[in-house]
Image: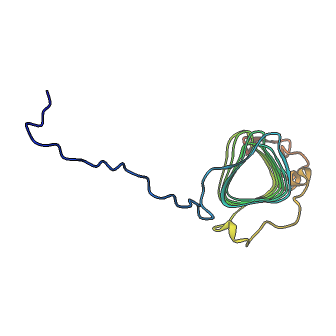
Amino acid sequence: MFTNKGRPLEPTTVTPNMPEPMTQRRQTPGRAGIASIIANGVKITGTIEADGAEVQIDGEIEGNVRGGSVTVGDTGMVKGDMVSESVTVHGRVEGSVRARKVMLARNAHVLGDIVHQSLSVEMGAVFEGQCRYLQDPLSGQGGIAATPPAPANERAHNLFGGGSVFGDPGERLVSGVIVTNG
């Protein structure tokens, strides 16, 4: 079937493709690789610094968190301040958040101030604090004033001129809009 038609066989040397010599594969600091995960049931007390890295928090952190991208999972809780390029909250945060991009998912509960360049809040999320837009929120300039917000009943009095969150008896609040009857 296959013949060499009388030609002598030439010795052939087959050189397998060898992989290149192993070089140390270290990612440069500040580059995202595999996310660091704080698992559900893990509690850490102290500061987490993961500059430029991705951090997934499903456990509990009692301290400040700094990372390139931080996600607080459904079971996650952070009691401290967060500084990051991007912060996504599905769980609970008790402290200030400073990031270029902040996203509060429907299960989020944030008790603290947010300084951001971009903020999105899904319906169902709870946010108790002040928020402030800054072109560069990571510069550390232009935080939110240290004075605590007025109590809810005082704010309602200032907003509506009465002691009720619904304003005067001739007004009612519908989806954030004051509707008057007169």
Residue, far top = 1
Query: In this view of the protein, which residue sits in the foreground, 74 or 157?
Result: 74
20 relative position to 4: left or right = right
- Chosen colour scheme: rainbow
Query: In this view of the protein, which residue sits in the foreground, 173 or 170?
Result: 173
Q: Residue 73 occupies which quadrant of the picture?
A: top right
Residue, far left = 5
28 relative to 33, above or below: below
Q: Residue 91 occupies which quadrant of the picture?
A: top right
Q: What residue sits 63% from the left and 67% below the top?
A: 135
Q: x, y percentage for residue 122? A: 67, 43
Q: x, y percentage for residue 12? A: 24, 47
Q: Is residue 115 visible?
A: no
**Total marks placed:** 0
Query: In this view of the protein, which residue sits in the foreground, 23 or 90?
Result: 23
Q: x, y percentage for residue 159? A: 82, 54
Q: Is residue 137 visible?
A: yes
10 relative to 28, above or below: above
Question: Where's the C terminus, which quadrant?
Answer: top right
Q: x, y percentage for residue 172? A: 79, 41
Question: Where's the N terminus, which quadrant?
Answer: top left
91 relative to 55, above or below: above
